[in-house]
Image: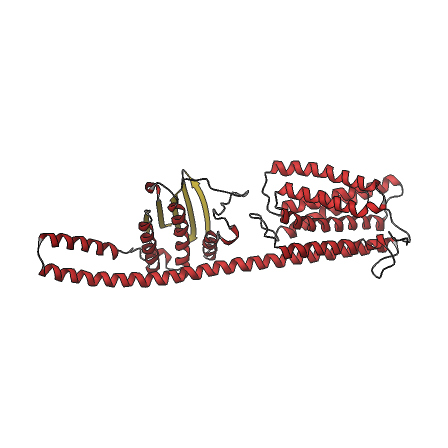
Amino acid sequence: MDGSTITNALPDIPRIYTALCEWLACIVYILATYRRVPWQRTAAVGAAGLAGMIVIQYFDGIMPLWFWIIGMLLAFGGMWTIVRFGAGTGNREGLYITARAFVLGELVASLHWQLVMFLNLGDTAAAKQRYSLLLLALTYSLCFFAAWLLERGNFASDRPTDISVPLLLGTVAITIVTFAMSNLSFVSTNTPFSGTVGQEVFYIRTLVDFCGCAILYAQQEQARRMAANAELASINAQLASQHQEYLASKENIESIGRLAHDLKHQIAALRAEVDPEHAAAGFEQLEASVAAASAQQHSGNPVLDVILTTKMRTCADRGITLTAVADGKLLAGMSSMDIASLFGNALDNAIEATSKLPDRQQRLIRLALYGQGRFMVIRVENYYDSTLKKDSTGALRTTKRDASRHGFGVKSIRHIVAQYGGEVTIRTEDHWFVLTALIPR
């Protein structure tokens, strides 16, 4: 440590205040981010974590001055443990969140103690202590509640935060620089960035910590916006893909329809010329197969007809029984692209899940489109015979290994339905997976 001294140096922040502040910062982020463990475990880790942070701070307080950096690393490790096991995060996500919590804790602790020293309320030591505790309750409550309000919008509550290596390295670097600059005056007053007067030192510390928090918040906001844009781009790409599939399917069906029409005339001509009984039986069989190939759905909406006809052929190839009862006229106010994407995604998900069933008799899909009062109801049901994975909010998880690149089917459905002021619900009952979309007519 440098031999220079600070003029009118202020008393250090009480260790128990620092421990409480760091613990509360962890709790704020546990509440604001995606939690993958039961509340009972979070509460147990939180209680043990508070005791652990107090022990760490008092241990640091009795150690010599050279132990200061090690003591701060111990405090950071304690905070990481609370976040890691209290929220059930991964190592990378836990380190990222802890770095943000550490800077927040530094800011609130510095701000509170600066207010205590500046106001200097109370004539006796006991009175000063009471006012200090009152300011602590007020400052901590306001600051941490405001932090929770801001941060809960920066993190998804239904899935882990995807932390890239560059984002993590940037956050750690900002945390280290913020901590170093805010505490530089305590190490040496002989630098261009140090303060020499007690109150001035705390001004610098509070302002630097505030800037660090602001930079980290802006960094996370930018990362969140980039992730949202990437997800929207993926949804739009899937919508466009579904629309192209519809156009290709429509062309194929029209071509098959023309071919079937021509074949019927050819069969009629051949029947008039050739009359052996065995040939007649063969022609009847050929006619039946042609009729099956030219069969199309007639729901009252041409786009839906194409989708249902295409998916029914896919189901037939995979041994799946698809039953559809649909009043396509209800879709008159919906764009063809949205219809293709909505029904295409819903049926694709059902077909994919049902295809995995070993028992062909269980490969069942039901689709219904009907009006109910002032609403249009779209219901797609498929039988399943496996364990469905859910997160802590009860939402279903994708069964595919790379969850970050899948699961957009349901998101696309929700996105389309929301555009028309509707809602999507997903539930399971008695081995039936039921997706229901309710859209105002």
Position in image of residue 54 (x %, y %): 76, 39
Left or right: 41, with 284 as reference point:
right
Closest to the observer, 421 or 403: 403
Question: Measuring 80% from the left and 39% from the top, which residue is drawn there?
Answer: 59
The quarter of the image holding the C terminus is bottom left
Q: Is residue 284 above or below residue 395?
A: below
Q: Is residue 266 above or below residue 60?
A: below
Position in image of residue 331 (x %, y %): 37, 57
Give the colour scheme shown.
secondary structure
Looking at the image, how many numbered discs can be counted on the residues?
0
Left or right: 139, with 343 as reference point:
right
Position in image of residue 170 (x %, y %): 67, 57
Left or right: 38, with 378 as reference point:
right
**Res 213 → quadrant:** bottom right
Question: Measuring 87% from the left and 49% from the top, which residue is drawn there?
Answer: 10
Question: Measuring 37% from the left and 46% from the top, which residue is drawn there?
Answer: 355
Quick check: can you spot residue 441?
A: no
Closest to the observer, 178 or 373: 178
Question: Measuring 66% from the left and 38% from the top, which residue is drawn there?
Answer: 45
**Res 81 → quadrant:** top right
Q: Is residue 278 above or below residue 64?
A: below
**Res 293 → quadrant:** bottom left
Left or right: 344, with 105 as reference point:
left
Quick check: can you spot residue 363?
A: yes
Position in image of residue 201 (x %, y %): 84, 54
